[in-house]
Image: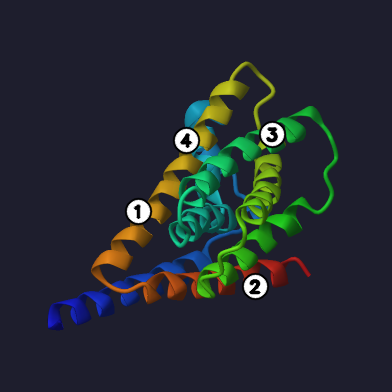
Amino acid sequence: MKSITVQSRLLLRLLSLLSATLFAATPAFAHVSVMHSIAGGSGFLAGFLHPLMGADHLLAMLAVGIWAAQHQRPAYWLLPLAFPLMMTAGAALGMSGVILPGVEAGIAASVLILGLLIAGAVKLPLAASTALIAVFAVAHGYAHGVEMPADGKALSFAAGFVVATALLHLSGLLATITANRLLSTKLSRIAGAGIALSGLFFVSAMT
């Protein structure tokens, strides 16, 4: 029991450090070009780095995995699958030049709302959960799509951000499952509260 308590305190400290780092990070709507320069500006690596460039993208991707872990099957696996699929559709819209209003607001809201759902351990009906994830995924995908290279590397760029997204979903899912089994289910709710606070920061930064 003492060992579990020590582990819980350590994890909470790590979460606090992570939250501080994320608050210091730049949201997706204020991306810098450093990582694009490192990756050569296009191709798989640039696409892979893109979801990692902004804390809002990063937190939303992790939140999808965390929220999915709070569900039962089939939502358990359907939500992390629906997000990359609909994100690809959103990227196609962005690349095609279609104007989609409110994208950045939708991205910021996705972090806030997913964080609140996790913090409250809210489990919506499957159709509603999937629809909500789909809407958020289109917004995130559109943001990726408008920055996709116009050359022949667009497909590899898209593959990069899809792979990164799937890995972030998996990280959130596995971390939550592990924490629930070894520590406490409260930890995911604490993480959700931190994500929601970050989302509130992103929303307020837009005003």
Judging from the image, what secondary structure is the residue with disc 2 in?
Answer: helix
Name the spot of residue 35 as percent of width and height, x first.
51, 42
Is 162 above or below relative to 79?
above
Res 163 label? 4
Identify residue for label 1.
174
User: According to the image, label 2 marks what residue?
Assistant: 200
Distance CA(mark 1)–CA(mark 2): 26 Å
Q: Kindly identify the residue that appears in the image at 39 percent across and 76 percent down.
A: 186
57 left or right of 168?
right
Left or right relative to 23: residue 27 = right
Alpha carbon distance from label 2 to label 3: 27 Å
Q: Secondary structure at mark 3?
A: helix
Amino acid found under the numbered disc labelled 4: Val
> Residue shown at 69%/63% (left/top)?
109
Of mark 4 and mark 3, the one earlier in the sequence is 3
Which mark is on residue 89? 3
Secondary structure under tag 1 reads helix
Contact (CB < 8 A) between labels 1 and 3?
no
Q: Amino acid at mark 3?
A: Ala
Nearer-N-terminus badge (1/4): 4
Contact? badges 2 and 3 (CB < 8 Å): no
